Amino acid sequence: MPIQSLLIGLAFHAAPPPDFNAAAAPLMARAQESRGAFSLLTDLVDHVGPRLSGSPGAEAAVAWAATQFAALGLEARKEPMLVPVWVRGVEEGEVLAGPGRQKQPLALTALGGSPGTPPGGLEAEVVEVSSLAELKERGAAVKGRIVFFNHAMVVADDYGRFGVLRNGGPAAASKLGAVAALVRSLATASMRSPHTGHTRFAEGDVAIPAAAISVEDAQLLHRLLSTGQVRVRLVLGCRLLPDVMSSNVVADLRGRERPEEVVLVGAHLDSWDLAVGAQDDGAGVALVLETARLLSGLKERPRRTVRFVLFMNEENGLRGAKAYALAHASELANHVAAMELDSGAGAPLGVSLKAGAGAAALVGPWLPPLAPLGAGTLLVQEAGGADLTPLASARVPLVSVVQEHAHYFDVHHSAADTLDKVDPQAFSRAAAAVVWVTYALAESPGALPKPVAPPAFSPASAK
Ligand SMILES: [Zn+2]
């Protein structure tokens, strides 16, 4: 990940207590020596497995998480909400034979939220575009066709830029009369494995079948289209079922001095269905539970309450995030910091903040214990996480432990997001960094200044 980072000049005037190194050393050593986060992650992926919200796997994950908290002596609450149920079915595609050309199969997988095709599939000519602007220019030319969204994702930081094609491309194509959409996988590497993800159809949109194709198959389509017309046959058996109840899992480690002040540490419990979601976001779940394990084992609890939140339905709806913001609306003013772990299992690189002026001076003095991990630096980049977006209107300060993620999008949302891609040593360093940053936020005498108000977000109006 090419991080645009630099060291901020820090005013070291908000000093932590003189014995803070004495607190840091054993906490961070335990995180690294025990490799507890890796054990938790192994247990989650081997015993629960894939956990798309609304599936039996997701409910197994809820039960598993509650059991983990209970084993630490922490009472876990299941906070309910309705979640969508989307199920995958048969998925097949092929480039049809053309003049002087044999037919060829396409490696593809349906995007979450996509409707199925008619049972016999559909066939249409393909139109390639590389942006939503180009789609708009094509206008009526895409009517009755399959729109193929091609792009040039190379590095992890391209995800935001090209992610709009997967999120909004199929709906935009539908508005112009397209019959289906194929989106080049958002991936930084490929062994011909397609990468799924959510695609959004708003109320009133005509939902059309939408699938991700592997990078290799996207390149094939691009080459064939440069020489002439291409027709594709697509069969998708996926469908959306009625919503069901599910839950966030929430547990508090009550603060010894200011229990009403909350430091939220979260991750999302759901994953995509194609794999066990070791990186996305099993790693984050394990980091949250390991932090709970290490902090609950302290002789003296931190000053503030640390709240561990495992959100449901981050991947295809953010229902858990919205439900949390609604259920806790009256306490959000007392959320003094929130951190979401949703960047995989890579080594820690530093800390970033989204808070008001003076935040760097407050956090900076707590960073030296992270230096041996290679993470003792305050980085100038976004802090946050998708599940924390509904907290923005309450101006909750956001903190991130930035992790190395150059290879995160090699496997993200694909069948290859499995445990073998996790380096236990790097992951244990991430766990050490997360537990220390959490402790610092909960123990620091001063609280982070709140960030400036963002544009209004109303969880009540969100679906
Ligand atoms: Zn995630």
Image (spheres, helix red, strand yellow):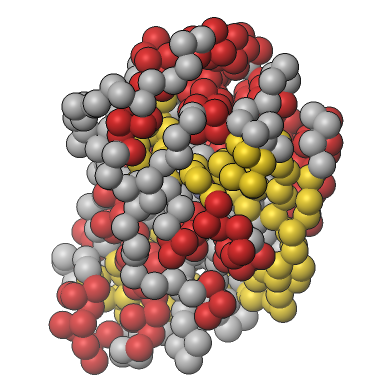
**In this picture, is 216 found above or below 3?**
below
Residue 69: where, in percent of width, then height? Answer: 78, 36
**In this picture, is 375 found above or below 1?**
above
Q: Which residue is more in the foreground, 121 or 116?
A: 116
Q: Residue at x 45, y 39 (%)?
A: 447
Q: Which residue is more in the foreground, 376 or 407?
A: 376
Residue 238: where, in percent of width, then height? Answer: 61, 71
On the picture, is 55 further left or further right than 4?
A: right
Is any atom of residue 57 visible in this view? Answer: no
Q: Residue at x 26, y 57 (%)?
A: 161
* On-image quarter of the C terminus: bottom right
Is any atom of residue 37 visible in this view? Answer: yes
* On-image quarter of the N terminus: top left
On the picture, is 406 further left or further right than 418?
A: left
Q: Residue at x 66, y 41 (%)?
A: 259
Residue 41: where, in percent of width, then height? Answer: 65, 31
Q: How many marks?
A: 0
**In this picture, is 143 found above or below 294?**
below
- State which quadrant residue 361 falls in: top left
**In this picture, is 24 found above or below 215?**
above
On the picture, is 247 further left or further right than 223?
A: right
Q: Which residue is more in the foreground, 86 or 36?
A: 36
Q: Residue at x 72, y 17 (%)?
A: 299
